[in-house]
Image: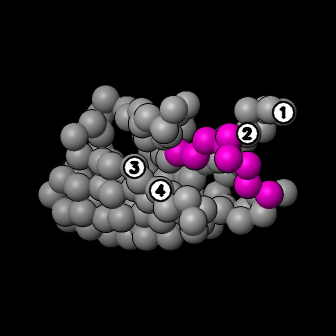
Amino acid sequence: QVQLVESGGGLVQAGGSLRLSCAASGSIFSSDVMGWYRRAPGKQRELVASFVSGGKTNYADSVKGRFTISRDNAKNTVYLQMDSLQFEDTAVYYCNLRRLVPFKDYWGQGTQVTVSS
């Protein structure tokens, strides 16, 4: 079993920054892939940023150049540095761990990010 605990959300003014953290515990495999998703009010959950095979990163077009995903493998922790936040970034942000074999998605409880305009 895998547990994901997010932290770091909150209220920030437009143009500000926040850093989200996601600590993973339990049975973590080196092949597991971690990332961040978000769900804005009235919208579907969407990918924000993730690690892909080969250690590369993938970002939604809307956050490229503003958000940075990073990780500390020793701590099984993934971070999302969010800079130049915009009102449209307001959403609940979810940490995701994807196990490829067998396929399974694990989700954190979510952390609210609110950007005031």
Q: Is residue 49 magenta?
A: no
Q: CA distance from mark 1 to mark 2?
A: 7 Å
Which label's residue is closer to the chain start, 2 or 3? 3
- The type of residue carrying mark 1 is Pro
Q: Position of residue 34 (x, y in %)?
A: 58, 46
Instruction: Examine the residues drawn in magenta and state their main secondary structure.
Output: loop
- SS class, disc 1: loop
Q: CA distance from mark 4 to mark 3?
A: 7 Å
Q: Answer few, some or many: residues within 10 Å of disc 2's Cα (few below 14, many 20 plus, some between 14 and 19).
A: some
Q: CA distance from mark 3 to mark 1?
A: 25 Å
Asked whether residue 46 is in view, the answer is: no
Q: Name the residue furthest left.
A: 15
Q: Nearer the viewer, mark 4 or mark 3?
A: 4
Residue at the location (73% across, 32% down)?
100
The label shown at residue 71 is 4
Are the residues tagged 1 and 4 within 8 Å (C-beta)?
A: no
